[in-house]
Amino acid sequence: MKFILLFLSAALVNNFVLRYFLGICPFLGVTGRVGSAVAMGLATTFVMTITSILIWLINHFILVQFNLPFLQYVVAILVIASLVQLIEMFIRKASPALYRSLGIYLPLITTNCAIFFVALLIPLRGYSLIESIVFGFGAGLGFTLVMLVMAGIREQLDFADVPEPLQGAAITLITAGLLALAFMGFTGLITA
């Protein structure tokens, strides 16, 4: 039950995009089409989950053992950058069309502050290895869910009769705000 609550907390209640405004660049930039949003979300979920595992292992067995916690930031950046490079090489070979549609946003996963936040929050909260995996996976799926919902809404807005002053970025930000309000409905169901 504890793991389910942690998962739901990371995915819905404390969604990084809508509650902490982390990962806004890909949230606004890649959500023009559902396919690109899902691919970016799944890539981010993969990086968050693997980062959670590696950060916990490195922190627990190396940084804490040798009294080097001040290297957490550097280690997190190196782990995230390495994983993103692996994903980029895989997508470039497996699906060149997807690689082109993700464009600059794929390498920018390296600087996605939501992933960095997960990497730094795990040692801070003192999660176990399993809790770290559940937290990273839940946060990643929450990111993917928000990306998917936003992309679906934006695709529908392409066919809507939006007043001219609200077209483009304005309607996108209004939609993001309404989506954040919808996710606020989960507040109070699960704490932290």
Image (cartoon, rainbow, N blue to C red):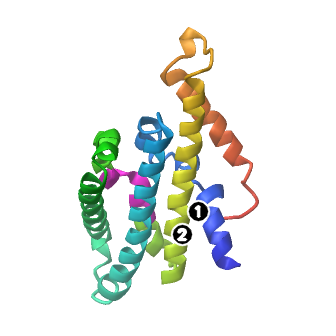
Could you tell me residue 158's position as x and y percent?
55, 23
The residue to which callout 2 is attached is: 135
Q: State the SS at label 2.
A: helix
- Closer to the N terminus: mark 2 or mark 1? 1
| Dot label at residue 10 | 1
Q: Nearer the viewer, residue 124 or 1?
A: 1
Which segment did they paint magenta? 109-118
* Res. 42 in view: yes
| Dot label at residue 39 | none
Inspect the magenta stretch and tell me whether residue 3 lies in it.
no
Crowd around label 2: few <14 · some 14–19 · many ≥20 (10 Å): many
Crowd around label 1: few <14 · some 14–19 · many ≥20 (10 Å): many
| Magenta-drawn stretch, dominant element (helix, strand or loop) | helix
Q: Quadrant of the N terminus?
A: bottom right
Q: Taking 51 as reference, is 68 left or right?
A: left
Q: Looking at the image, is 120 positioned above or below residue 25?
A: below
Could you tell me residue 47's position as x and y percent?
38, 63
Q: State the SS at label 1.
A: helix
Could you tell me residue 68's position as x and y percent?
28, 80
Q: Residue at x 38, y 85 (%)?
A: 60
Which quarter of the picture shows residue 102?
top left
Q: Residue at x 57, y 47 (%)?
A: 146
Q: Amino acid at mark 1?
A: Ala
Q: Taking 72 as reference, is 144 left or right?
A: right
Q: Quadrant of the C terminus?
A: bottom right
Q: Residue at x 50, y 41 (%)?
A: 34
- Whole-Å distance between the Cαs marked 2 and 1? 6 Å
Q: Looking at the image, is 50 positioned above or below residue 63?
A: above
